[in-house]
Image (cartoon, rainbow, N blue to C red):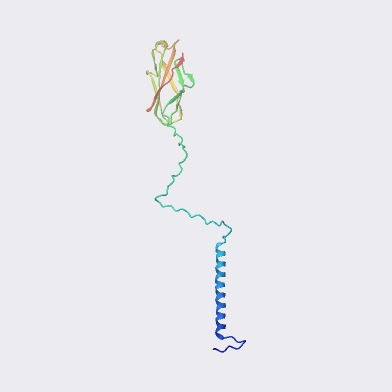
Amino acid sequence: MMPLAPIGKKEFGSAQSGKRAMVGFAVIFLVLLIGVIAMVVLLQPQGGSDTNPPPLQETHSLDTMQVMPAPSPPDTEPPPVPEKKPVDFVLEPGPQASCGLTCRQLTPTITNTGDDTAHNVCINLVVSNSNGDVIFLNGAPAISQCVGDIAGRESRSEPIVIDADCGFLASKCIRQTLTLQTRVTSDERTVQFPDQMIAV
């Protein structure tokens, strides 16, 4: 039988094992405390945002992605280009001045109303009396006086002296109404104008 230890004295071995148990409990408590704190921190929402995690963004492959066509511009047609107006003529007879019994001086004005230039423009005049007889002008059955080229939208005035050959004693012109026929010609166009009456 082992002798009893004196009162007030503990064995060295039992004191060491008690300290070890206390240290073990303390370590376990600290580990549990740290784990609880970590769980609380991880479960708290960050920045006051919703607790729900953001939805995952969908990813599309190039094969399944649909390419939307670019919006078409509004249906606006360009303004129509105005067509060029061809050569045409307007004739203003102008005033008549008497230069004798059967002589008249005319100053007609020719206007090219087209957009293109009229080349080799000429004024052709023929005079006939009330009986239909052709009256020679300046010794010829007709007068052709050329004024050259007239650009588009431009005008040209040309004085013309008409000396009518009315025959013996002016019988073809006296008490007759002479009809002046005027025609304007160019390389591009010929225009016949209304007759002009000349009283003798």
Relative image position of residue 171 (x, y in whole percent): 41, 10
Which is nearer the eye, 53 or 29? Answer: 29
Looking at the rendering, which quadrant does residue 69 occupy?
Answer: top left
Tally of marks = 0
Q: Is residue 98 above or below residue 23?
A: above
Residue at image location 56% in from the left, 83% down from the top: 14
Relative image position of residue 153 (x, y in whole percent): 46, 30
Looking at the rendering, which quadrant does residue 77 occupy?
Answer: top left
Residue at image location 43% in from the left, 15% down from the top: 179
Relative image position of residue 175 (x, y in whole percent): 45, 10
- 77 relative to 19 in the view: left or right: left
Relative image position of residue 37 (x, y in whole percent): 57, 67
Residue at image location 55% in from the left, 62% down from the top: 43
Which is nearer the eye, 125 or 20? Answer: 20
Which is nearer the eye, 33 or 133? Answer: 33
Which is nearer the eye, 39 or 46? Answer: 39
User: Which residue ends up furthest to the right in the rendered image?
Assistant: 8
State which quarter of the image contains the N terminus: bottom right
